[in-house]
Image (cartoon, coloured by chain):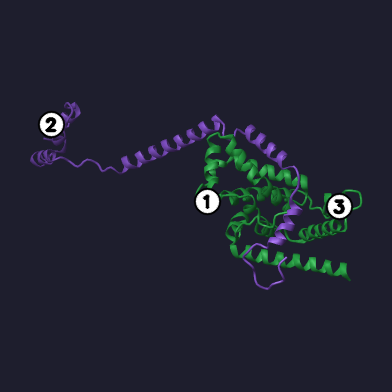
Amino acid sequence: MNPESKAFSAEPDRVLGAELRALLDRPGEAEFVAVVMAGAAAAGVGSTRAVLGRWARVAIAGLVVVAVGSALVSRSTPEPAPTLDAEWVAAATGSAAAAALLTSQNAPDATLLYASVESN
Amino acid sequence: MSAVPDREAAGSRDDDEPALVARALAGDRTALGVLVTRFAAPVRRLAYAILRDADEADDAAQDGVLQALVKLDRYDPARPFGPWLMRIVANAAIDRRRRRQVRDTSELDEGLAGGGPLPDVEVDRLALRRRLAMALDKLPPRYRMALVLFDVEGYSQAEIAEILGVAPGTVRSAVFHARRRMRRWLEDWKEEGSG
């Protein structure tokens, strides 16, 4: 063993280490490995099922990330700005309902038509 | 008996362990066997140093290694495998020690229990080992773990800090005090023997 020192030696004390290793080493290493390997097999470590399960977890996590990302993107998308046509019609007629009716991409809605007539 | 820390003696290469883990996770039983065999002796020694009971130590080491293998996919391959595994095994042994009453008497070394006359050199060696065992038993568990991980297993202070969940300075202090106490007890014993 190294002589008594007041300073800490950052190197392992190899003599003390060897004595301690001899003290702590015991026979039965092969049995230990066999028991652990049997336990690992029983627990399915590295089995096809475990591999597929791991991939499934990764896939599910990926889908969740994509879904959350999509939700955040759609939430942050701004409302479409009124088109120039709609603004022009609204300014000319003084009616938002008329603007909606005239600039709509869809077929006229009876309620919109009625509202437009009413407002004029 | 080799006088080099276990990692050097076993030719352990930290850099191939992430690859072995990846292969084991992919179902390669040989890679799994290499990992378990490589760490069998160190984990058994660490558990024995903590518990000081051979059967309990093996049970704790098996529990710890199995826990690690079951959550092998959580191992970060960017970090060394040894400290990760040793931490899980140390925790398994510490948990087991907490659950049981600490035994007051240390086990008689198997070598001492055998019958028949022994050569003087062998008697001295067995007596030294028994004294060493008693000295180790007297150390606080944290000192004991730090000493074994540093002087027997050859882990760095930073790695031991990771294994024990303490600051590197605490490891340094624990190893320093553990060595000093061990040397003092062994010196006292030698003086008693010669006096």
The location of residue A63, given as percent across then percent down, is 41, 35
Q: Residues within 10 Å of mark 3 (few under 14, many from 20)?
A: few
Task: Please state the chain letter of the residue tagged with numbered disc 2 in the rendered image.
Answer: A
Q: Colour of chain A?
A: purple
Q: Secondary structure at mark 3?
A: helix
The location of residue B100, given as percent across then percent down, is 77, 49
The Cα–Cα distance between marks 3 and 2, rounded to whole angstroms, is 111 Å
Q: Colour of chain B?
A: green
Is B1 in front, or is A118? B1
The Cα–Cα distance between marks 1 and 3, rounded to whole angstroms, is 42 Å
**Labels 1, 3: front one:** 3
Please indicate whether residue A64 sits to the left or right of residue B144 in the image. left
Regarding residue B143, the answer to whether it shows in the image is no
Q: Secondary structure at mark 2?
A: helix
The Cα–Cα distance between marks 1 and 2, rounded to whole angstroms, is 75 Å
Q: For mark 2, what is the residue?
A: A117
Q: For mark 3, what is the residue?
A: B112
The location of residue B145, given as percent across then percent down, is 69, 57
Please indicate whether residue A5 sits to the left or right of residue B27 in the image. right
Q: For mark 1, what is the residue?
A: B79
